[in-house]
Image: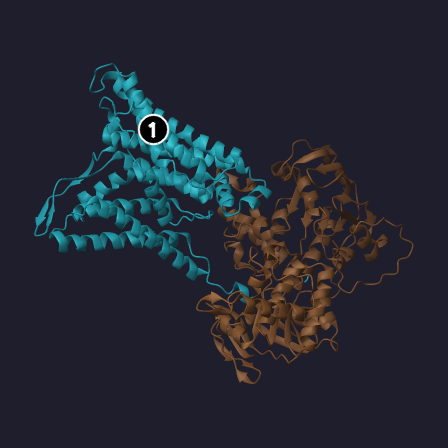
Chain colours: A cyan, B brown
Amino acid sequence: MSQTDTEAPLLSDQPPAQPRIMNILGPMLGLILVIFAGGIAEYFKEGTLNYWSPQNQCLILTQTVTVALGAIGMTMVIISAGIDLSAGSLIALSACAAAYVIRGLATPGVSTLAGSEAVWLPLLGVAGGVVVGWMAGATNGLLITRLKLAPFIITLGMMTFARGLAKGVANMQRIDAPMNWISQFTNANLSLFRLDVTWGPISWYGPVAISAAVLVTIVLAVVAWLVLSRTRFGRHVFAIGSNEDCARLCGVRVEYVKWGVYAIAGALFGLAGVVDFGRLSVGDPTTAIGKELDIIAAVIIGGGSFNGGVGNVFGSLIGALLMAHLRNLCVHLGLPNYVQEMVVGAVIIVAVTVDKVRQGKQE
Amino acid sequence: MADIAKSFGSTRALVGVNLEVRRGEVHALVGENGAGKSTLMKVLSGALEPDAGHMVLEGKPYTPRGPLEARACGVAMIYQELSLAPEMSVEENVLLGVEPTQWGFVRRAEMRRLVEDALDRLQHPDIHPAARVGDLSIGNQQLVEVARALAADARVVVMDEPTSSLTQADTEVLFKVIRQLRDAGVSVIYISHFLEEVRAIADRFTVLRDGQAVGSGGVADTPTSEIIHLMVGRELEDMYHRTRHEVGEPVLSLEALTGEDMPLEADLELRRGEILGIAGLIGSGRTELVRAVFGLDPVVRGEVRVLGVTCTGWGPPRMIARGVGYLSEDRKTEGLAGNLTVADNLTLSRLGPYVSAGLLSRNRMRDAAWQWIERLGIRTQGPDQPVDGLSGGNQQKVALARLLHQEADVLLLDEPTRGIDVGSKADIYALIGELAAQGKAILWISSYLPELLGVCDSLAVMHRGVLSEKRAVADWSPEAIMEVATGGEVAPETVTAESEDPLGRTGATT
């Protein structure tokens, strides 16, 4: 073997690869910027500084859970160079499924669960919601890998199908279910501390609380991160997203991995649906319309790319948080709903552009 | 061009490069991959602005602010990836971007005249102005690019690896055109890896190495070995260094292997320690053969036996488990996952050893990657560098390292040295020799005859899906290979006098 050149090769004279923590620096900075600017804007417009209150900030965390759970699953899908447009519909379907199970199995006529039912039924409800989401996701995955059609098309079809199914299950209404611990779990009931400050523009009072679901979301995010970065399955997902043909050559069972990815995402959408049911305390088939766009935007802001092969679970969480902050901010600024939509849309474009510029500089 | 320097961030692509091209000469620009040839030409054609240095064209200072201005000054660039619009006609392509217009409307008559003028100069009656470019052969498409240069009244035409997708016949035509250009006083800068071509067509040459111009001179006065020495900066004695290795029992057997289209009834036996080459024209079915063996394409009939065990219902996961490795000819779209790191790519086909308690140990993966980086001499910052930051030769080494890391005993290599520099090629030849000595069996597909004849122990030739019998490499001559490749009879070799085909390649005639 001939001797390799000992002088430093010019080609490798590039800046070292950035440490992974830098990947979420972008979205984090964006979030901090929005929070900071938002507070200032509120002060000038309304004369108050309540957006910054710990109560509000923690409330936003609670409000983010649905999108965050969805974003965890969607991150996996997008890393594999796929897409899932059915997220919102699956959330609605799962919410209805959970409500259906609880109402169906509960003693008829009660408005609050009691006795052993109070413990087990909501559990079955959660299981029902997650399983429904999981099966729908698996169906997505199966169709995508068998029919070899674009994920965009398949999940678009599922989006419509699931929405219709949800309406059917709910009989074109909302499914009322007896009160249960799911609602307690998903509403801001974990009080961290009380705070009462009234001083000039600041009028912060009441308990600072988050929901238990926030903790569950964080745990799931950590698990997802572990799976993606530290397991063989995760490596395979990245490989498929980066270059599917290459992955196949390397012996990756591409079809099974993709199937798994969509199924897992479906299960997470299902869980998001259960959370949605908990927060509304009814199964509403018209909930979460368009939510998939928020979820996808969260993943892209968090560093995901439609080309596949790159993505970050924690970045997606920050993206979801960013979106929730924007919506909350609009309320505090007294802006009508349609302005919310416009702002969110503009932010998505800005965030993705900034990220692209940042990546371009690295090359 | 004098003292040209160009940096991309902290990468110094060009440092103080001087290039002098005379009127009416064919000047070859040679150098390894990553030496800076493309960058220099981009500076010349106005696609890039140099950080330092200046250029003089026909005695006047030349500072193009973009490719369009360069073209207006008479510098035409023909890229390796042809930049033609396949759906449009020859006429439209030739004048793309510089259509003669009046009030925004295209003047068709004048367009027609300009294009016919240019095509006339090419003396190639096959190409009609109204023909759809996508329908033309690659060779003719190349000529349309040349016509584009002529129509722009170019004084300098730069050709970047023009023959990499051309058949021998097309190459001859191109050379004829280049000589015509030269005789008409146009200067041609010819970039190529193939030194035989440079010998055949160029008058003078300049060698680039690591972003610097390290030598230039007349082609006729300089032996090839010296040019290689300048390119590589070290002695490359005996490029096709043969190692002693013993051939053992058969490890891969194909019997009447038939795919959906190709191969047709392929019979083959590959033995331990053997390097078996497969020659053939582009499109003869060699890639289809190995893809069928590896299980990527469906098999209609026939049998594949690995180590005596017949394969049933196979696919990449099973073949890899049996010790078969496949190196794709297309590393960009198939061979490597571009944005993943060196370590990721290297270990992708065998992640098992790094899993403990369900989790991968990234550190152990990195350590393994370092071992292979050192063993193969891969020039990279480290296992965490994304693979698309490496040069072609080093990327190929990563792909090969993956096969070795996989502990493959049977290696199916499809064009392993395509598009990589001389230095890396020599490294790979040596490596394959070593592997054969260790008892691995290697199937080597290549379109570059000198390589096959220099490295392989035995050779078979493929023609339209039909695999010829295998013979020891000493029993083949370039003419015999060519004959079988083009469909002639396999004649028993009685004369071993070898007349070197000047371009040393298997050309297609269909």
Is residue A167 positioned above or below B317 on the image?
above
- For this view, does B510 lie left or right of residue B90? right
- For this view, does A325 lie left or right of residue A140? left
Residues packed near mark 1 inside 10 Å, few (<14), some (14 to 19) or many (20 plus):
many
- For this view, does B407 lie left or right of residue B382? right
Mark 1 chain: A
Q: Which residue is mark 1?
A: A94
As rendered, which of B354 and B125 lies closer to the eye? B125
- Residue most toward the bottom? B59
- Residue most toward the top? A108
Where on the picture, by quarter, is residue B95?
bottom right
- Residue most toward the right? B494
Q: Is residue B109 visible?
A: yes
Q: Quadrant of the N terminus of chain A?
A: bottom right
User: Residue B26 at x, y = what percent?
Assistant: 67, 75
User: Residue B74 at x, y = what percent?
Assistant: 56, 76
Q: Is residue A1 visible?
A: no
Where on the picture, by quarter, is residue B89?
bottom right
User: Residue B123 at x, y = what percent?
Assistant: 70, 68
| Three-letter code, disc 1 | Ser
Is residue B350 positioned above or below B202 on the image?
above
- For this view, does B194 lie left or right of residue A193? right
Give SS at disc 1.
helix
User: Residue A105 at x, y = what percent?
Assistant: 30, 16
Residue at left 21%, top 41%? A59
